[in-house]
Amino acid sequence: MELTDFLALAHPAIAVFFVFPLIGTVVNFAWSTRQRRLQTSDGGKSKIPPVVGTEHRKLGYWLTAAVVGLTLIGLSYPIGEHIIKKQVWNTNPFQVIFILLILVATIASLVLLYRGRQRMWRGIFATLTGAGLVILGCQDGVYRLTKEWYWSHYYIGITAALLMVFSLAIVEDIYKDKSNRWRIVHTVLNCIALLLFIGQGLTGPRDLLEIPLTWQKPYIYKCDFVNKTCPTPPQPSK
């Protein structure tokens, strides 16, 4: 494996080592928080400590940042590889500058989203963060598998990241809404996100199998992927 191949492993390695364990912890605290709320709703007592709600929210903040950060890493690698190999800086420097500005703006918008308190600003920064992810995902070099979008690691991941951003944006509303409508929205969306994360766990290893190593690409990309055939290599001379 070359250095570029090791760099390609940063995205799945962070997902395995950090993001997926964090998802399990957040789900556990979410379930405990709901159980405690149900047990105390009629004035009863619960053996579940009150701190579970605070821990769920705190780890939820970490999860959103981790998912968005992981998405940016996953997008930056193929975009950067494309820029270097195609020498885009020489042919279209404006595009490179635009991509860098969008990357910085997306990170800044996420940071400001965490600091936002008013609903209008939270909506603006959440929209900017989501738009940045989508724009970066549309750049050349990203492995999107658009023909099979319903089974695409890219589309599933972008959708999960957008749900995380939206969930972060409505946290303040959850605690202010006495009718629990925002809490229900939060629960439904994050259940969908959990299913998407499971899909990520399945499609990620598949993509690692489909994307060849650097030294393999010149030969692999000569294959006919529709008919699943590859050119016969020349026989060594005797």
Image (cartoon, rainbow, N blue to C red):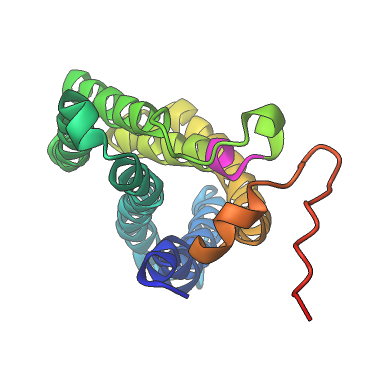
Which residue occupies the foreground of this view, 218 or 233? Answer: 233
| Residue 135 seen in the figure | yes
Locate residue 43, reporting x and y percent: 49, 53
| Residue 98 seen in the figure | no
Image position of 109 (left or right of 135) = left
Locate residue 209, reporting x and y percent: 66, 61
In reply to whether residue 133 is colored magenta, the answer given is no
Residue at 42%, 41% (x, y): give it.
164
> Where's the C terminus, which quadrant?
bottom right
Residue range corresponding to the magenta coloring:
152-156
Magenta segment main secondary structure: helix
Choose top left, top right, bottom left or bottom right for residue 100: top left
Image position of 70 (left or right of 106) = right
Locate residue 230, reporting x and y percent: 78, 51
Which residue occupies the foreground of this view, 214 or 7? Answer: 214
Residue at 84%, 47% (x, y): give it.
228
Which residue occupies the foreground of this view, 89 or 31? Answer: 89
